[in-house]
């Protein structure tokens, strides 16, 4: 049981480590004045105020790091995180109460081992350092007795969790049944009919046809809730024509980037390393005699060519093997020659001559790069002024009139698009804003700036018929084509069922083998593979798509190979997932049962006091 505790308390150690580091960056425990010591209890096991406070502070710090912006207790409450934290503490208290009731604990030896494992408590030599231990706990607002009691309690809780998780192996019948279903495959033959296979073209739709199709498929032509947005933005490209780059700066950049414009002679090389020069020489002799080729040597080592590919290399990259490799021709194998870990054979796949781009030819690329870099710096210098203008009451229209920013409008419904809608930062800002919110300067992520204003939120509504007429016409035509093709496909399918071949039916069949349930066959209509799995051997199915129809015949149902690596992988994953699900449900049931037997009390006033002190 002690060994079990040793392994299972690691997760808690990291939680405690997080609290220690939290203390080191300035978040100590919150101590409330007065006699309030707990925010609740399970039985006689109290949930201490400091434990709840530290958990809240830890979550605030995590969220602030993720968002890059301040997070308040009100934000936690709005997201329900405070209740989650309290629920976790209630569960822990329930386990502590049950551990005390049944006398479950870990000894001092295990506790000492866990303390020695924690890096924050170790000195320069990697051993437990008493001073480091005391200092870390002091900064986290914990006493040694408190920390050790928490660690001992978590070890006991870990033992209880382990007891629940143990023995939840799923029956082989359950696993085998699901694996047999998931891993079986199908072999089938299919052919596709499209508009070219129609004997006559689809007639032109009337206005009544289009209107009826529009009304019958109104969901396809309904605009989602849309924000009508005015934006002002400034990108480096907008300033490119106004930025001048001197020849002196161009020459400096050319010198700085010499490695891009002056390339030495290079080779594309594969390298197969051997344990000794003798082994490499023997392999070279086998290649020279024609007994084997380079690919055969690679495959014989259980490798793929990608595993031995060095890519493009220079003489400097090859060290002592440079002369041998650079003296070999394309397709030749050089060596034995030195390698970092022994001796190797090198195959040369291509010879790349030295290449030098003169300054005059490099100028366009240099100028484009420098212009954009300078434009980004110009925008960066303007950012504070633009923000101050907005804070002072300037509108987006004012910014466009008085600065380099350009103004525009967009109807945005959460979709990515062109222009400013292509920037994730715009989508994030637009998603959070509502009419009446004040614009502020945001970064595009590529050196640009923007600010937006939501002028109006348009509710979900059908788009006017005239606005989507072309789309309706396309949809109506495609539906009529599919309908006509389905009629022909039914006739052809009947002929196939009577024994006629695909070829005799003027079809061009294709055959697929070992298709699994999860296989996606892009050439087939959506959902076709699922429908094919419902067929019996020899059955014929007509599978309509959008403007095309497939005809498929199931040739064979291939049972799962239960001994295959894929079946074993599915079985292992299924056992782990199912056992984990059962263990989670059992643990929840245990925690609920303990709380029912012990009784749970929550002091809302104490919770409110913690929240108030953290505001």
Image: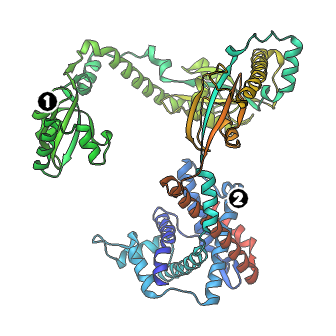
**What percent of the width, then of the height, locates residue 431?**
67, 37
Nearer to me, 19 or 293: 293
CB within 8 Å, label 2 to label 1: no
Image mark for residue 80: 2
Q: Can residue 32 be seen in this view?
A: no
Which residue occupies 66% across, 57% down? 76
Which residue occupies 26% across, 43% down? 298
Image mark for residue 326: 1
Between the residue at mark 2 and the residue at mark 1, the CA separation in whole angstroms equals 66 Å
**What percent of the width, then of the height, locates residue 88?**
64, 69
**What percent of the width, then of the height, locates residue 374?**
40, 24
* As drawn, 195 above or below 570: above
**What percent of the width, then of the height, locates residue 512?**
56, 35
- Circle 2 crowding by C-alpha within 10 Å: few under 14, some 14–19, many from 20: few
Q: Quadrant of residue 611 in the image? A: bottom right
Screen quadrant of the C terminus = bottom right
Left or right for 60, reference 134: right
């Amino acid at each position: 049981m002690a060994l079990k505790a040793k392994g299972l308390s690691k997760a808690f150690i990291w939680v405690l480590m997080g609290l220690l580091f939290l203390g080191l960056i300035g978040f100590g425990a919150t101590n409330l004045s007065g006699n309030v010591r707990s925010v609740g209890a399970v039985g006689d096991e109290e949930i201490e105020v400091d434990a709840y406070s530290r958990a809240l502070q830890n979550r605030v710090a995590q969220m602030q790091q993720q968002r890059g912006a301040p997070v308040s207790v009100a934000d936690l409450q709005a997201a329900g995180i405070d209740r989650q934290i309290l629920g976790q503490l209630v569960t822990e208290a329930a386990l502590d109460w049950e551990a005390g009731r049944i006398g479950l604990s870990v000894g001092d030896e295990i506790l000492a081992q866990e303390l020695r494992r924690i890096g924050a408590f170790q000195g320069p030599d990697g051993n437990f350092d008493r001073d480091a231990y005391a200092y870390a706990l002091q900064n986290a607002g914990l006493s040694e007795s408190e920390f050790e009691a928490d660690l001992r309690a978590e070890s006991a809780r870990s033992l209880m969790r382990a007891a629940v998780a143990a023995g939840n192996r799923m029956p082989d019948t359950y696993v085998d049944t699901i694996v047999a279903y998931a891993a079986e495959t199908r072999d089938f033959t299919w052919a596709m009919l499209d508009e070219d296979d129609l004997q006559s073209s689809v007639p032109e739709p009337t206005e009544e046809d289009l209107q009826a199709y529009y009304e019958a498929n109104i969901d396809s032509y309904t605009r989602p809730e849309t924000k009508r947005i005015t934006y002002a933005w400034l990108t480096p490209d907008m300033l490119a024509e106004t930025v001048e780059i001197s020849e002196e700066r161009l020459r400096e950049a050319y010198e700085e980037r010499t490695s891009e414009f002056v390339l030495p002679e290079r080779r594309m090389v594969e390298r197969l390393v051997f344990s000794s020069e003798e082994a490499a020489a023997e392999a070279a002799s086998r290649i020279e005699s024609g007994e084997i080729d380079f690919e055969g040597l690679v495959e014989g080592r259980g490798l793929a060519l990608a595993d031995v590919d060095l890519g493009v290399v220079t003489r400097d990259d090859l060290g002592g093997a440079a002369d041998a490799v650079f003296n070999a021709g394309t397709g030749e194998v050089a060596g034995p020659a030195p390698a970092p870990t022994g001796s190797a054979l090198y195959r040369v796949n291509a010879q790349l001559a030295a290449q030098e781009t003169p300054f005059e030819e490099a100028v366009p690329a240099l100028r484009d790069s420098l212009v954009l870099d300078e434009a980004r710096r110009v925008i960066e210098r303007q950012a504070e002024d633009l923000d101050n203008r907005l804070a002072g009451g300037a509108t987006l229209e004012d910014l466009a009139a008085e600065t380099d920013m350009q103004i525009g409008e967009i109807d945005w419904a959460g979709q990515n698009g062109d222009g400013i809608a292509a920037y994730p930062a715009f989508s994030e800002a637009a998603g959070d804003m509502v009419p009446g919110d004040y614009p502020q300067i945001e970064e595009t992520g590529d050196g640009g700036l923007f600010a937006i204003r939501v002028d109006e939120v348009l509710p979900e509504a059908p788009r006017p018929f005239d606005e989507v007429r072309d789309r309706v016409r396309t949809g109506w035509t495609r539906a009529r084509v599919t309908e006509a093709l389905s009629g022909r496909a039914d006739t052809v399918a009947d002929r196939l069922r009577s024994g006629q071949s695909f070829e005799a039916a003027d079809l061009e069949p294709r055959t697929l083998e070992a298709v699994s349930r999860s296989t996606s066959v892009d050439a087939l209509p959506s959902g076709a593979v699922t429908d094919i799995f419902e067929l019996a051997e020899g059955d014929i199915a007509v599978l309509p798509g959008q403007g095309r129809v497939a005809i498929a015949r199931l040739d064979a149902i291939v049972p799962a190979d239960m001994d295959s690596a894929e079946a074993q992988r599915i079985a292992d994953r299924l056992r782990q997932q199912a056992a984990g699900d059962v263990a989670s449900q059992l643990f929840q049931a245990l925690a609920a049962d303990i709380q029912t037997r012990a009784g749970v009390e929550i002091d809302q006033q104490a919770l409110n006091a913690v929240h108030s002190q953290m505001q």
